[in-house]
Amino acid sequence: MAQSKTRPTPVTAAQFIAAVDHPGKRADAAVLDALFRRLTGQPPVMWGPSIVGYGQYHYRYESGHEGDMCRVGFSPRSARHSFYVMACGDESEEAAFAPLLARLGKHSRGKACLYVNKLADVDLAVLEEMVALGWHRSFEKWPD
């Protein structure tokens, strides 16, 4: 079975954030790193080339595919920030996050990602609630 490309790397989050090209995205990434550290109590780990992740869990799908991933994280991509705070394809996740998404501000969604152009577009307090909720729910779904 193929190994996932999204694995911890030796690059530090500080190195990665310092190398973000766009000054606004770099500043947002520094704010996000501080927020995620405070809410999770964990140091950041780079997952693959661009995900700043906090915590870790092991998953195994019914198909037999398994791997490790950060519990929550973000990626300051060139077009928009990607947030990894919700499990995909889970109706209870959708229900838990729906009230927060309604209050968040300007964003879009993918299957498991939340996308935000810049932090100024959203209510940072609501984003904090989402990160905290995602962190706590990850332990319900994937206990230590």
Image (spheres, rainbow, N blue to C red):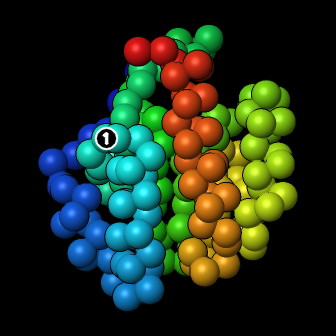
The image quadrant that residue 62 belongs to is top right
Question: Could you tell me which quadrant the C terminus lies in?
Answer: top left
The residue depicted at 80 percent of the width and 61 percent of the height is: 103
Q: Is mark 1 on a helix, strand or loop?
A: loop
Q: Residue at x 55, y 60 (%)?
A: 82
Up-down relation of residue 93 to residue 123 (above or below): above
- Label 1, residues with CA under 10 Å away: few <14, some 14-19, many ≥20: few
How far from the left and from the top, in percent, is residue 88? 68, 36
Residue 115 lies, in percent from the top left, at 64, 63
Q: Quadrant of the N terminus?
A: top left
Residue 71 percent coordinates (x, y): 46, 35
The picture quadrant where one finds residue 14 is bottom left
Q: Which amino acid, by three-letter code, is at mark 1?
A: Gln
What residue is pinned by disc 1? 42
69 to 128, vertically: above or below: above
The structure residue drawn at horizontal position 79% and vertical position 28%, both measured from the top left corner, is: 92
Residue in view at x 15 percent, y 48 percent: 10
Camera-side residue of 108 and 139: 139
Relative to 21, does residue 127 appear above or below in the rendering? above
